[in-house]
Image (cartoon, grey):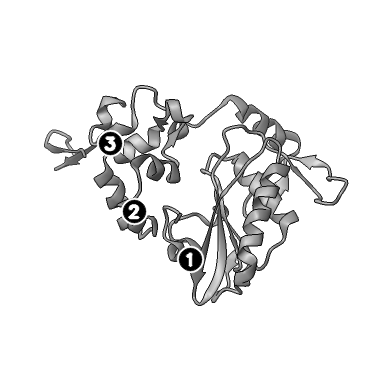
Amino acid sequence: MALPINIEELVHGKTIEWERLEFKKGWNPEVIVRSMCAFANDLNNWGGGYIIVGVNEDEGQPILPPEGLPQDELDRIQKKIVELGNRIIPSYFPIVQPYFLNGKHILVLWCPSGDNRPYSAPDSLGKEGGRLNSYVRLGAASVIAKGETLRRLQELTARIPFDDRMNNQATIEDFNLGLIREYLQEVKSDLFNESDRMPLMDLCRAMYIVKGPIEHVRPVNVGLLFFSLTPERFFSRAWIELVVHKDDSGRGFEEFYFKP
């Protein structure tokens, strides 16, 4: 299943901040499991990040064309990523998608912020298992959380950002499929071509705009703000107001309201 983002723009940093991107020339599981853990902990509430395997980097910038990965290794690596997810405590699994970019095969790991922070990952994948550490992103690096940084991370345990909270007043029927597909087309996501054949539930799960078990699936707030025709039903004054002042006195002005 494609990711809800355009891969070319992702690699060039046009849609995601560089701090949320990590490029890896080849497959290095010990390094990658730490980055998975760091993005899951999402210390700055950026929404996680992306690990792009098969693309070399120079001071955080991608070197293109990509180095690529052997096609016959892609399936093995994806299975290994599941193993890595089980080595993180508590378990954490990114969304993995292979792509063909500039004639080369690459893997993109989408690592959203986790719901069960803080996460810890081993510093070694040897038989002994390695010591567990909580990793976070500082700039473009994944580092062990210590001192004040570790305290900040531990405080996030019971704190879920407003955007990612489930909204129990809404249901999946409050999403407008047209708005969702319009967005996917605008960002040039490969998911757009699949979206007309997917059940709405599967599409929403792929975009991480719903949460909960199958018997109690609910939209998250950011999904309602983006893809509901009537977001003001759930959020007071959920529209844009623009005031244009005609002079410095403030007496003459025009007001404009922008709603879905």
Q: Position of residue 88 (x, y in %)?
A: 70, 41
Q: Which residue is mark 1?
A: 12
As drawn, is 26 to the left or to the right of 224? Answer: right
Can you tell which quarter of the image residue 169 is in? top left
Q: Nearer the viewer, residue 132 or 177?
A: 177
Which sits earlier in the primary sequence, circle 3 or circle 2? Answer: 2
Q: Amino acid under label 1?
A: His
Q: Residues within 10 Å of mark 2 (few under 14, many from 20)?
A: many
Q: Are marks 1 and 2 in contact (CB under 8 Å)?
A: no
Residue 45 is left or right of residue 241, and the answer is right
Task: Report helix, strand or loop for mark 2.
Answer: helix
**Residue visible at 32% across and 52% down in the picture:** 197
Residue 100 place in picture, x, y as percent? 50, 70
Compared with 153, 56 (above or below) is below
Which residue was labeled with disc 3?
A: 228
| Residue 247 image-quadrant placement | top left
| 1 vs 2, front mark | 2
Residue 129 image-quadrant placement? top right
Q: Do labels 3 and 2 touch, CB within 8 Å?
A: no
What's the residue at 79%, 40% (across, down)?
A: 132
Residue 150: which numbered mark, if any? Answer: none
Task: Identify residue type, mark 2.
Answer: Leu
Q: Nearer the viewer, residue 251 or 104?
A: 104
Identify the amino acid type marked 3.
Ser
Distance between the alpha carbons at the discs numbered 3 and 2: 15 Å
Residue hosting label 2: 184
Instruction: Please tell me whether mark 3 sits on a helix, a strand or a loop.
Output: loop
